[in-house]
């Protein structure tokens, strides 16, 4: 089994900074062309100047053997975003999108919003500029069950905003539930990124046979029924679902403690995991749409003219299961088991 696809893009990735950036950027740069870089650094990226400086650090850290790597930058939706600066950043091609985080929902979201309705001016500006709003759709209401928080956020926050601004392009990031798929079904303004781990795992994998902190992320991996809805949407070839890995490295010291940090590092083998999901679904003919062409159309860029070949075969060589940064932090690679079944070569 062998398939050739245009070089994939990753429309949602956390590259971090400093020693972690140095350690992870090569995994993304060697596999993907565009990378939509999330702005949730310890000090959030809220201005076009911050975004340009961060892009420069990413480019400086990227390996020389990945010449077609194209990081594109996002601003963190916060009261600190100045609308004139946003317009300038977009006009100069520095800012590609804005990301909304509910305050407290996930890693480095403290600077996020209490309610989407507080940012209508910013969202109107995005609609006018034809720039997409990226949304982490997860309620922070402690009264809502953790597995119902995507649905609750969509109902309470996202639907009112999308009703009010039907011309605003919305990307529902790392969609994790059937309710999220239904939101995209119902609205032509909406699209969604899907992660390798939400496609390949369900919550019993996370919790049933020894709790696995390496699968813990936000939004949490949900039920098998939800995963099936994600697989159906992603593998269908439809234009509004595409790959955003949400690769989010955390040191094992932060994962294996009393309060595991949310985030799965999948930049290394996320493509293999996705290929395996499509293979199991009998839908490899739609892999390129999901990994390489749908997202490009949504973000108004041409799909890559370079290609990658994926071959399903046993790999004899050892597959790495961790890496260590120069600062001594160890990070676990998601998908190493699946990576033993796929050989990926850049053409
Ligand atoms: C992300 C991170 O670690 O920055 N974690 C995660 O579980 N997905 C943040 C995010 O995208 O929610
Ligand atoms: Zn993320």
Image (cartoon, rainbow, N blue to C red):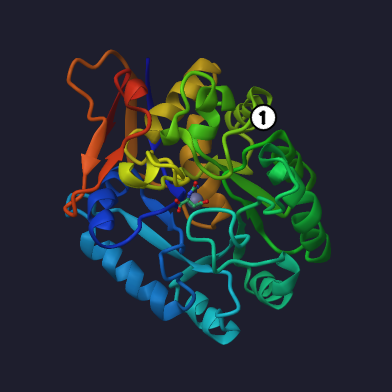
- 316 or 289, nearer to the observer: 316
Side (left or right) of 151 relative to 1: right
Side (left or right) of 336 relative to 242: left
Residue found at the very far bottom of the displayed protein: 84
- 78 or 67, nearer to the observer: 78
Residue at 62% from the left image edge and 28% from the top image edge: 227
**Quadrant of the rendering where the N terminus is positioned:** top left
Q: How many marks?
A: 1
**How far from the left and from the top, in percent, is residue 9?**
42, 46
Residue at 17% from the left image edge and 54% from the top image edge: 64
Residue at 76% from the left image edge and 39% from the top image edge: 182
- Kindly identify which residue carries mark 1: 226
Whether residue 122 appears in this view of the structure is yes
Q: Quarter-wise, where is residue 260 in the image?
A: top left
- Cβ of disc 1 within 8 Å of ligand 1? no
Side (left or right) of 57 relative to 46: left
**How far from the left and from the top, in percent, is residue 11?**
48, 50
**Quadrant of the rendering where the C terminus is positioned:** top left
Q: Quarter-wise, where is residue 71 in the image?
A: bottom left
Q: For label 1, count other residues whose C-alpha is less than 10 Å away and answer few (under 14), some (14-19) or many (20+).
A: many
């Amino acid at each position: 089994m062998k398939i050739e696809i245009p070089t994939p893009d990753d429309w949602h990735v956390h590259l971090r900074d400093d020693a972690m950036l140095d350690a992870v950027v090569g995994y993304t740069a060697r596999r993907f062309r565009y990378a939509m870089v999330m702005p949730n650094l310890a000090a959030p990226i809220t201005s076009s100047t911050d975004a340009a400086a961060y892009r420069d650090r990413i480019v400086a850290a990227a390996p020389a053997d990945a010449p077609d790597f194209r990081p594109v930058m996002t601003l963190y939706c916060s009261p600190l975003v100045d609308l004139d600066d946003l317009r300038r950043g977009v006009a100069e091609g520095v800012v590609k999108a804005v990301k909304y985080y509910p305050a407290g929902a996930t890693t480095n979201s403290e600077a996020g919003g209490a309610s989407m309705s507080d940012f209508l001016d910013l969202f109107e500006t995005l609609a006018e500029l034809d720039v997409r709003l990226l949304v982490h759709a997860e309620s922070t209401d402690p009264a809502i069950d953790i597995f119902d928080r995507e649905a609750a956020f969509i109902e309470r926050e996202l639907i009112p905003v999308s009703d009010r601004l039907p011309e605003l392009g919305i990307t529902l990031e790392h969609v994790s539930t059937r309710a999220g798929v239904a939101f995209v079904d119902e609205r032509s303004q909406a699209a969604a990124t899907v992660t390798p781990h939400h496609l390949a795992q369900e919550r019993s994998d996370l919790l049933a046979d020894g709790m696995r902190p390496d699968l813990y992320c936000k939004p949490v991996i949900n039920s098998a029924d939800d995963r099936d809805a994600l697989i159906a949407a992603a593998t269908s070839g439809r234009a509004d679902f595409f790959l955003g890995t949400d690769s989010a490295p955390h040191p094992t010291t932060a994962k294996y403690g009393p309060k595991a940090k949310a985030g799965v590092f999948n930049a290394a083998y996320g493509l293999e995991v996705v290929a395996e999901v499509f293979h199991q679904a009998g839908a490899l003919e739609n892999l390129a749409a999901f990994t390489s062409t749908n997202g490009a159309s949504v973000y108004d860029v041409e799909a890559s003219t370079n290609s990658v070949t994926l071959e399903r075969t046993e790999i004899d060589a050892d597959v790495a299961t961790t890496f260590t940064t120069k600062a001594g932090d160890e990070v676990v690679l998601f998908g190493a088991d699946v990576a033993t079944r796929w050989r990926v070569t850049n053409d």
